[in-house]
Each structure stands twice: as structure tokens, then as C-alpha cells.
Amino acid sequence: MTTPHQPLLDVKGLRVAFGGKEVVHGIDFHIAAGEKLALVGESGSGKTVTALALLRLAQNADLAGVAKLFDPQASNGRDLLSIPERELRGIRGKEIAMIFQEPMTALNALYSVGDQIAEVLELHEGLSARDAQAAAVQLLADTGIPEPERRARAFPHQLSGGQRQRAMIAMALACKPRLLLADEPTTALDVTVRAQILDLLADLQRKHGMAVLLITHDLNLVRRFADRVAVMEDGHIVEQGEVATVFEAPQHAYTRKLIDSHPERNVAAVAAGADARPLLEATGLRVSYPVSRPGVAGWFRKGEFIAVQNADFRIAPGETLGVVGESGSGKSTLALAALGLLKYRGALKVDGKGWAVDRGSDLALRRVMQVVFQDPFSSLSPRMTVEQIVGEGLRVHAPELSTEQRRERALAALADVGLSEAQFPSLLDRYPHEFSGGQRQRLAIARALIVDPQLLVLDEPTSALDVTIQKQVLGLLQRLQRERGLSYLLITHDVEVIRAMAHQVIVMKDGNILESGLVERVLDAPEHPYTKTLVAAALLE
């Protein structure tokens, strides 16, 4: 039998190496039955590799150390790192389950959600196909998915991000595991959905009495969810202890750095002047898409989905307008319409002129207004060098420049965003994969700045970044706004980023603007119930 102080999982001297290069350096930690331990750190710190190593899912990894899983009915634990693969297959999913970071890639696109959950039950519990399907529906219901019978028949792409994450949780909990490994389970979700998933995990953890190892870079999540925390940097655990103790009196410099990495407001006031012409102004903006209609009526006429309706807003020189709302609220559609990339109705003017939807007529406006996308890795061509990426705008908007002049302008733009050849020898000849996430976002900002725009559209510019890198990028954007008098249209679901960056804010839901005004007024004294929900969810994190 286990002793009262014997942990459920005891890891000692865990080392992980790939091709002779060690990335996890002899770490120790333990998890008690029913305990919630958070493993926190930035991207590349070794968190996910550690979790994958416990189940020997890290491909081509060389593992060393001991990771003992103890059974309540046995005195000796089983070493997950050395037991035969066949025995480990019986543990995966049944005794230790894992929720992966991105459910869209973790779920099989060719099978319905119900079939994928049922497969786990048939494999580990020996249920018949009919009983497994019924249990899958019940598991989806337990995770709060509406219409679970219909959703069980749906494929992953037919579910929202929050619903896919709930389906992943249902699959992980199918066999009532004793330990759940949750790898960034809320990173890609909106703030309100994030809070719902966190509450769901906590409720299910209490209900089933399981232990949870939470992998995250979000300290607010740790503060709200975990009992203990282990802080990881460069493959080492540098500090661990009770959450309250570590957060109130961090001992390691890296822990202090993480705790201090919340967005800080540092924006200049917008110059007064009622007669100043706005850089971007919309009145009655409306964007819709054709959709198929059900039944015979769909043979003759398409239906209509209204993505943005009756939107009014303006952005003055040097001003930041934040647009906040959940996924599907119409934020990105509004931004694409503002960029002249979608057809719209109503009035929309950039620097006093409307989009003509003609390449020649719109070229001058494209120089006024540039965009920085959410994910710098997918928005930067992997086949182009830094020189080609950053200088691309000059080839279009300043074709009279020579190759040498374009190189000089590219280096100046890169220096503006904190990238220099002193840091990165042969900087212009490098490719995007040679840079970190934060550095790639700086490349994307340099690409936009090189044509001297007056207005930047920032579409979730920091949502894919760690907290420390997010703070650096926001500080860079604040500095550039002060020095260049830039205006920003900032699209985000993060209320704290809006609070740090915006002068004005509009709150969107289902294509409608529910509330707008000065950021201090809207966020400190919200009037609409939906705004109150967003602000409350952000404060709870």
C-alpha cells in the first residue's frame, strides 16, 4: 500500500536529448493524488517536452532518469521511462491522459468527434460500439457542449475553438485517468471561453479526484488554478513551491521576470483638434457573405450572413482604436474591410479617400495603411530572405530606389524594431525560421514600417507570444507610436492589451458594436452586460 506522503508521480533526474543535444537537464518534481501542479515557463523552456517524455511521446528523444507512477494498491511504482512499450500503451489514456495544445491538429479531421471519443472507450474499457457511442455523448454533455448528440456526429472543423477543446477534455477523461497532462489548454481561446474551460477543468478534477499537470506560460492561469508551481527556464526547474508563496515572494530572477511581464500602459495623449481629419473613418459599415439556404429555396437564391453591421468609428492621427470581442464577433472582418480587402456597404474613408477596389487608384492608400498579422510565422514567406521580406513594400511603392538604397532602408527599418547586424550577422540573408517568435513579429512590423505608413492595422499582434515577449512587442509599438505619430487599429480579444495600448475602444459581438468610448470609461465602468462579462473574465485570470 502507498504511504500517506507517497506521490502519485515522482520524477527524478529527468533528462531529454535530441541528437546528442540535451534540452531538459535532470529535473525533479512530484505530483500527489488529486493535486494540481503547474509547469510554467516561456516557449522553448522544455515544458511540453517534459510532459511528452513522461508518456514517451517525444519522437527520437533520448531519455534518462526515473518517472515512477504509483498505484494505491502497490508498494512499488512503475518507471514510465523504462517499462515495456506494451505496458505503457495500457497506461496512456487510461491512467494518464493528455490534452494537447491545439485541438484542431490533435483531433482527426476524418472522423466525427463522437467516434474519436468512443474509440478510446472501446480500446481501454472494452465497451461495445453502441455503449461507447452513448458514453461519448454523455461525456460531451458533462463538458457542457450544447446538443451533445448532434455535436457527437460533427467533425472537428464544424465545432468552435471552445467546443473542440471541450471535446479534447471529454476524450482525455473518458477512462477516468488518475493523472491529466494539460498542455496549454486555453492558449488559443477567447478570454470568456478560457475562463469557462478553466472552471470546467477544476470541476472535473474535483469530481474525479485526479491530479493535473498544467503546462502553461500564463501566470494568471497558474494563480487561479494550481496548488503548486514549478518554474522552468532553459530545461531547468529554477523554482517550485506553493503558488501563493512563489507569487508573493519569488526567489529566482527568472520567476520575478515572468511575474513582472504584464502589459503596461505608456501611450501619449492624442493631440487635441476637432477639425483634424481622421486617418480612418467609417459610417454605417456593413459586411455580409452569401450562404446556402436549406431546402428547395436554396436552389434559387442564396441566404446572407451579416458579419459586421452598422459600424461607426474614427481614428485620429496618433490615436489607437482597440476592437475587442470573442472569436466570431466580427473584429477581423471589420479590419479586412478597413484594409479594402472585403466588399462592404456604407462609407469608409482612409485619409479622406474611399477604396476604389482598383489597384492603381488604391496603391497610394496602401502606403498610408499597412497591416501586421497575428501569426508572424505563417505571414512571413519561409522561402524569402529578410531583405526580400522587409524590402518588398519598397519594390511596389518606391520602384525608383536602387538595390543598395533598398538595403539601407531595410537595415534602418530593422534597427527601428531592435534588430541589427551586430546581433545577427548577415541579417538580411537570413530566413524567418532562424528567428524566435518575438523576433519574427519584429520582422513583420519592420516590413509594415518601411513604406512610412500613417496607420497600422494590428490583428492580434501578441496573442501567439509569451508574456515577456508580449511586453517587449507592446513596448516597441508604444515607442514607435510616440516617435512617428502612428495610428493603430488594434484587433484583440485580450482586455489587458487594450487597456495598455488603446485610447478609444469598441466592443463587438455577433457583428454589432455594443459599446464604445474612451478606454478608461468603457473598461473601468462598462455599461453593457457583455462588456462587463469580458472585463470580469479578464480580472479573474
Image (cartoon, rainbow, N blue to C red):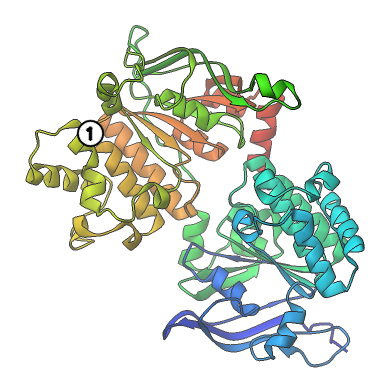
Helix, strand or loop at mark 1: loop
Residue placed most toward the observer, 301 or 189: 301
- Give the residue type at disc 1: Val
Q: In this view, does 1 lie to the left or right of 65?
A: right
* Above or below: residue 370 compared with residue 39: above
State the image quarter where residue 308 is shown. Answer: top right
* Rendered location of residue 208, percent (x, y): 86, 64
Above or below 329: residue 423: below
Image-quadrant location for residue 74: bottom right
Residue visible at 55% across and 40% down? Answer: 494
- Residue 55 against residue 293 in the figure, above or below: below
Does residue 8 appear in the picture of this structure? no
Q: Where is residue 426 in the image (x, y as percent from the top left)?
A: 18, 61
Picture quarter containing residue 228? bottom right
Horizontal side of 384 relative to 211 (left or right) equals: left
Q: In which quarter of the image is the N terminus?
A: bottom right
Q: Residue at x 79, y 55 (%)?
A: 114
Q: Mark 1 points at which residue?
A: 451
Closer to us: 164 or 111: 111
Residue 76: where, in percent of width, then height?
79, 93
Residue drawn at point x = 88 percent, y = 64 percent: 129
Tell which residue pokes out farthest to the top in this image: 275
Q: Where is residue 75 in the image (x, y as percent from the top left)?
A: 83, 92
Say which residue appears at 69% left-offset and 53% top-offset: 224
